């Protein structure tokens, strides 16, 4: 995959990892014999692989406190920032500050639960986003947020969580209306996982973890 041309983007991906990650997905799985830990990791790693294909491994900033995810990220050539442990917004901001310190004026924050994200989708979003001081992409329901980006060289105000799309709009981030179903659809429980498998094309790691 050809990487996105100038401006070069850094993409921050928070990855919780470990037994506490994606508790809703783990608790809702009813597929016997499925290694839910492997599945949760696979979802994040598919998201990261697409991101690296678009911006390059050295422009992927992984924020995590989990040793296994730290080791994986380093093995892939990603930048690793310790999760401060004070919530998702603070974790993402720590990653953004690292990206800015590395000279990146164009920085996006992408949540790590989009196993059906495609490289053309991410490239399209970053191309459109480059024309805005700051922007966001809402999730499929239009209430949550899949990605927030800035081209100002300053950390964007972040307000992830339930109802975050309205908060990000109120913070002045421009909503991007782009056709990117793999980005807009996050996987956080069994129903969303099943929908992704039936209607989209999850990445190879996710499919392998599902035994497909």
Image: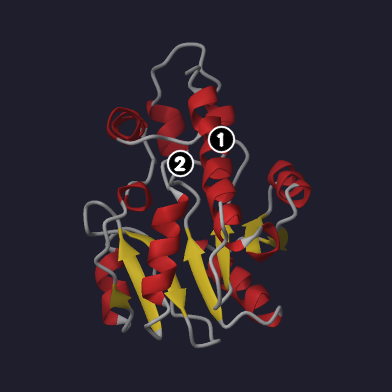
Asked whether the residues under the numbered discs 1 and 2 touch, taking CB atoms below 8 Å apart as contact, a structural biologist would say yes
Front in this rendered view, residue 109 or 85: 109
The spot of residue 13 in percent (x, y) is 56, 58
Sequence-first disc among 1 and 2? 1
Q: Residue at x 56, y 76 (%)?
A: 6
Q: Label 1: which residue?
A: 42
**Structural distance between the alpha carbons of marks 1 and 2:** 8 Å
**SS type, badge 1:** helix
Which of the numbered marks, if any, corresponds to residue 57? Answer: none
> Is residue 70 visible from the viewing direction of this image?
yes
Left or right of 155? Residue 196 is: left
Observer-nearest of 101 and 29: 101
* Vertical comparison of 199 with 132: above or below: above
Q: Residues within 10 Å of mark 1 (few under 14, many from 20)?
A: many
Q: Nearer the viewer, residue 188 or 139?
A: 139
Residue 95 in the image: above or below residue 42: below
Residue 115 is marked as: 2
- Specify few, some or many for label 2: CA neighbours under 10 Å numbering under 14, 14-19, or 20 or more: many
Residue drawn 75% across and 45% down?
67
Measured as percent of width and height from the top left, residue 140 is found at 25, 51
Q: Residue furthest top?
A: 32
């Amino acid at each position: 995959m050809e990487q996105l041309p100038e401006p070069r983007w850094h993409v921050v991906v928070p990855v919780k990892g470990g037994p506490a990650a994606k508790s809703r997905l783990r608790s809702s799985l009813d597929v016997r014999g499925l290694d839910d830990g492997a599945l949760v990791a696979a979802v994040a790693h598919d998201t990261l692989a697409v991101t690296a294909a678009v911006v390059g491994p050295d422009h992927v900033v992984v924020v995590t406190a989990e040793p296994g995810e730290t080791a994986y990220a380093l093995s892939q050539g990603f930048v690793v920032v310790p999760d401060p442990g004070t919530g998702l917004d603070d974790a993402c901001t720590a990653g953004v500050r690292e990206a800015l310190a590395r000279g990146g004026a164009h920085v996006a924050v992408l949540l790590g639960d989009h196993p059906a994200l495609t490289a053309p989708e991410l490239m399209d979003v970053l191309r459109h986003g480059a024309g805005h001081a700051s922007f966001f992409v809402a999730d499929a329901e239009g209430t949550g947020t899949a990605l927030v980006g800035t081209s100002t060289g300053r950390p964007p105000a972040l307000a992830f969580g339930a109802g975050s799309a309205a908060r990000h709009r109120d913070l002045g981030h421009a909503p991007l209306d782009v056709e990117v179903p793999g980005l807009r659809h996050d996987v956080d429980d069994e129903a969303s996982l099943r929908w992704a498998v039936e209607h989209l094309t999850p990445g190879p790691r996710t499919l392998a973890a599902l035994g497909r």
